[in-house]
Amino acid sequence: MTNNTALNKLVIVGVGLIGGSFALALRNAGLAKHIVGAGRSLPNMQRAVELGVIDEIATDTASALHNADLVFLAMPVGQTAAVMAQIAPHLQIGTLITDAGSTKQDVIAAAKQHLPPQCLQYFVPGHPIAGAEQSGVNAAQADLYRDKHTILTPLSETGINATEQIRQLWQACGSIVSIMPAAEHDQVLAATSHLPHILAFTLMNHLNRSTGTPENLLRFAGSGFRDFTRIASSSPEMWRDICLANRDELLKQIEAYREELEAMQEMLRKNDGETLEQAFSQARNIREGWLKNKKTVTQIKTEPAK
């Protein structure tokens, strides 16, 4: 692999929204000369070739990984251990390995169990915080990661150069890259991503079960309901794996959220409008402050140098 992070051969395992978008972004940036795709669905892989997302469909693991500069693991996190065990015998020293899993401690545990020890210095766990409710290669887009955060959680064994190369590749995709411990990542994402998905899925099921004619109820749902439940259209398989992989942290967040909901319930019981309004005002101020800060960070990143 050259010093400017250009890849002569990039291998994508799981050519869907995440893997396909990574491939397109690096191709557009001129940093991926030849892209090989591996996946479970042959029609999806054939479509990836038609769309120009990949150049070649892997026929076997050994040939796919031969002389690979980077292996990007973008399948559901529940498949991580099995895929790592599959690629381990065919990895070459110097081949970078990274992933896009929404949980990190389980991915690191799988790597330490299945990857050769000498390959761990080239393994850089990562998580792009970007996506859409659609899945499959048809949903892939070259600008998916632009101005989105990507978190890297390198192991103690991970080499500094490997981390830097992966950081540069994500930056070439337009992403804002941060580095943090895996445990902190899983805690943060349990609160900001995994819990909201649980809530969206649960609300849809609740409304369906609360009436014998859910279609009549949903007929009058407005844009706020649509926005709140948008992520309930996400892949059930993927979110099953994520929730189970981060189960301990997610259970803590569910319990904390339950306490907040019970506090709201008590305000309503007591007809305590003043406290209810204070809670709503606090939440609004927190959100508006977050949006303002997010906008400022994006402007700083996109403004041309003077």
Image (tube, grey):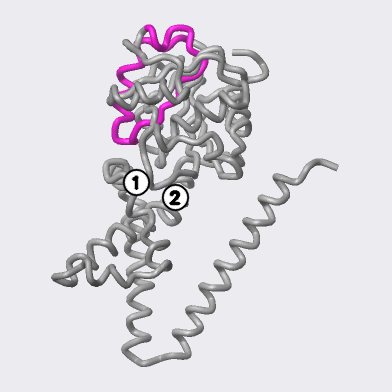
**Sequence order check: which comes first, mark 1 or mark 2?**
2
Residue drawn at 32 percent across, 64 percent down: 255
Q: Secondary structure at mark 1?
A: loop
* Residue 91 pos. (x, y %): 41, 12
Magenta part of the chain = 63-92
| Picture quarter with the N terminus | top right
The label shown at residue 189 is 2
Residue furthest toward the right? Answer: 306
Q: Secondary structure at mark 2?
A: helix
Task: Give the class, few, some or many, for how many residues have Cα within 10 Å of label 2's Cα (few <14, many ≥20).
Answer: some
* 68 falls in the magenta region: yes
Q: Give the residue number, with chain letter if any, for mark 1.
A: 246
Count of numbered labels shown in the rendering: 2
* Residue 73 pos. (x, y %): 41, 27
Q: CA distance from mark 1 to mark 2?
A: 9 Å
* Residue 35 pos. (x, y %): 48, 17
Task: Give the class, few, some or many, for how many residues have Cα within 10 Å of label 1's Cα (few <14, many ≥20).
Answer: many
Q: Is residue 175 left or right of residue 187?
A: right
The answer to whether mark 1 and mark 2 are in CB contact below 8 A is yes
